[in-house]
Image: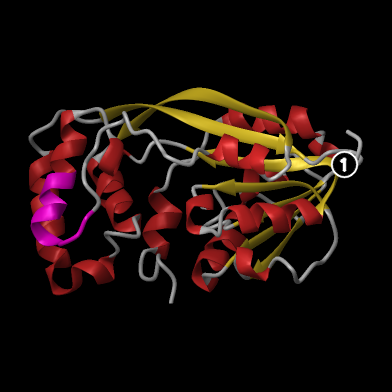
Amino acid sequence: MTAFESAEDHYRAHRPGYGTAAFTSLEDRFALADGRVLDLGCGAGQLTVPLAERAAAVVAMDPNERMLDHARDRVREQGLENVTFRVGSDADLPDRDGTFRLAAMGRSFHWMRGRETLDDLRDLLEPGGGVALMTDENWFTRGRRDWQEAVHDLAAEYLDDLPAFTGPDVEYDDPWDDMLEERGYAAVETREFPLHREWRADEIVGYVFSLSTCTPDTFGDAKAAFERDLRDLLTEYDQPLEQETTVEVITGRVRRSPEA
């Protein structure tokens, strides 16, 4: 069982991408055209396809086999032939199959072992290669708009122990850029790329069901009632509903030599 059991179809259809600029920055910084990339925790392939369009080869890895099936479909739809797939998590990294120019993680690093994962990855990266931690705003708990908080509040009427709605201003005790530097990565850099998104009712419903805290199985027999109430709620707002967000890309390099 994985955290996204029963959410896979919604994740494939309704988790948004990261925009073009974030991937262009990775392509430029790590010279991906002749490099091999690990997409760790690839999910349904939201990173896999844009990375494969820029890199020589990609290994896409996830513990959820249904997620991997969706990633395979997405790669096939784009006519890409430079991606291989592996079932596994960051805990399986010691099972090595070569080195990588870049290890990328999108909305997945917070599920991993943190420092231990970064140590394992460092040993798998070629000199001068690096890691990229990519994330964006989860509007379900960190949104800036009234409609986002209203969606969360409705779900909280059905589910116990949901993460609180905090809004966007959250500070973390253990920021990832500091963690990269602590684990010996060099030239750590954080870049932000603004994105404008528009959401319609079907997309909002699907996004909520794609969350690990709100999977269809989590709602159980109440899923249909929640979906009905959510769609009724959304009729109170003019659509499409807008979201201003930022894609954050934190990168760090492996040192080229012990003296570097």
Judged from the image, the secondary structure of the residue bearing numbered disc 1 is helix
Q: Which residues are magenta?
A: 152-162
Q: Quadrant of residue 197?
A: top left
Residue 20: image x %, image y %?
Answer: 59, 30
- Name the residue: 72% across, 59% down: 120
Residue 103 sits above or below residue 144 on the image = below
Q: Quadrant of residue 186?
A: top right
Residue 99: image x %, image y %?
Answer: 84, 55
Q: Quadrant of the C terminus?
A: top right
- Name the residue: 45% across, 56% down: 12
Taking depth in this image into account, of 130 and 42 the one nearest to the observer is: 130
**For this view, does 195 lie left or right of residue 228?**
right
Residue 140 sits above or below residue 69 on the image = above
Residue under label 1, please give it: 34
**For this view, does 151 lie left or right of residue 71?**
left
Q: Inspect this view and state whether residue 19 appears.
A: yes
Residue 90: image x %, image y %?
Answer: 62, 63
What's the coloring here?
secondary structure
**For this view, does 13 lie left or right of residue 49?**
left
- Name the residue: 24% across, 30% down: 241
- Name the residue: 63% across, 50% down: 48
**For this view, does 171 lie left or right of residue 90?**
left
Would residue 153 be counted in the magenta stretch?
A: yes
Q: Amino acid at mark 1?
A: Asp
Q: Inspect this view and state whether residue 80 appears.
A: no
The main secondary structure of the magenta stretch is helix
